[in-house]
Image (tube, helix red, strand yellow):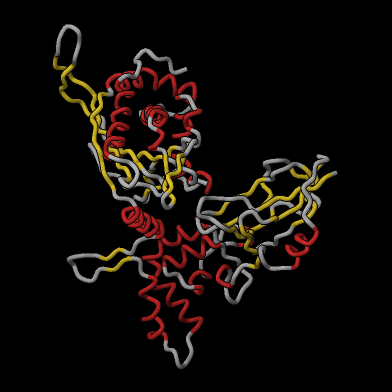
Amino acid sequence: MATVEMVMPKMGESIMEGTILNWLKKVGDKIERDESVLEVATDKVDTEVPATHSGILKQILADKGQVVPVGAPIAIIETEDHQSTPLVENEKKQILQNPDPVKPASNHTSKNNSNRFYSPLVMNIAKQEGISMDELELIEGSGLEGRVTKSDILNYLKNRKTTTSQIVDEVNSNHNTPSEPAVEQKKTEEPNSTPSQSLTGNYEIIVMDRMRKIIAERMVESKKISPHVTSFVEADVTNIVYWRNRYKQEFMEKEGVALTLTPIFIEAVVKAIKDYPLVNISVEGDKIIVKKDINIGMAVALPSGNLIVPVIKNADQLNIVGITKKVNDLAKRARANKLTPDDLSGGTYTISNVGSFGNLMGTPIIMQPQCAILALGAVVKKPAVIESPQGDTIGIRHMMFLSHSYDHRVIDGALGGMFVRRVADYLEAFDANRKVF
């Protein structure tokens, strides 16, 4: 028998630690590789962590509620493999005896005066929305042992406007003292607990939700970091439209998902990146990092009106069927709030389909630390010049604008313009007789 360490996985580029929510397996249980072993919370998402090896869960090194840095051991698995990776004895003692690197959750991750646990994600949302610990205690939890989940707190926030006064009154009734009258405490609670208010009949103030605050911060940050330049190209996508219309019903019947234009656009972007790899880059100080992987982020509009950007990893290794399935899967899970941190990390180039909102073109803002982003405009019928060996004619064509924003620190107008022109060339050269299967 041999033993291997299971460590806290990296769950996103900016995530440095996770909090143990719950162990789904106990010491002595048999586990299979990729079987969920525990639940972990970060400041972005709650997720299950799968086993890295098959075997017996020999030892748990991090208890429920503990904060564990990425890469630190959290469990020992006994396997039948004779090649082991045991802990160095003094390191093992340090992990078991020293609160660092596996440290107890700080006070702000659980309620002050009860045993009810709150994940970093829930606490972060509460902080952003101005929810006090007293108010948080009144939210009914649907998680394990009554734990408040992300869905619980977001659902609560939707109804909060109509229930704010009731919540505040209940909090006041529980905590009033002779020296702190209810009316005085209510005055201090209301500014943080009212999402919107109408000061006069002429306008209304709406407080940003958590996601909108994050989006706002990232957009401002991107504009500060990257000098944006945008190049525009118009492409004739008539052949693509007709091809898609011919196969969409058959595709739905065979694959069970819709065949849209987006996967074809992504395929053209991937081809252009291979031709111009210096668009698939990031910047670190005075160094340009050229990415070998082609991971395409795609902006998805959520029911709330916010945007999120899941990533299609290694898009250059997928055919049109594979890309289509990825696009549908990520979009569906994004709108159902079921994306994992890994779904949102690792992007090297991003597309945004502004045409889905009826827009002809746009000037998209770069997703840092990437250096370029492409906006896809609406496909519209236009009269256009059709060139042929017999001469030029006027015909009705399906046309769209491509808007390419890029970081002018490292991508000059020539490269940025040639890249978007190459994407258009691939779209216009699409083979209308191509087989989908």
Query: Horizontal placement of 18 versus 258: left or right?
Result: right
The residue furthest top is 390
Q: Is residue 313 at least partly visible in the picture?
A: yes
Q: Is residue 260 at least partly visible in the picture?
A: no
The residue furthest bottom is 179
Front position in the image: 175 or 11: 11
Give the image quarter of residue 411. top left
Find residue 136 and report its horizontal and vertical position in percent.
Answer: 50, 69
Front position in the image: 38 or 377: 377
Find residue 135 and report its horizontal and vertical position in percent.
Answer: 48, 72
The residue furthest right is 1
Find residue 381 and report its horizontal and vertical position in percent.
Answer: 20, 25
Query: Horizontal placement of 390 versus 421: left or right?
Result: left
Find residue 102 and report its horizontal and vertical position in percent.
Answer: 67, 63
Is residue 405 depicted above or below 15 in this figure? above
Q: Count of labels shown?
A: 0
Front position in the image: 104 or 114: 104
Give the image quarter of residue 83. top right
Q: What residue is rendered at 36% in x and 38% in y?
A: 351
Is residue 307 depicted above or below 397 in this figure? below
Front position in the image: 123 or 269: 269
Is residue 316 depicted above or below 148 in this figure? above
Report the quarter where the N terminus lies. Answer: top right
Query: Horizontal placement of 237 versus 113: left or right?
Result: left
The residue furthest front is 286
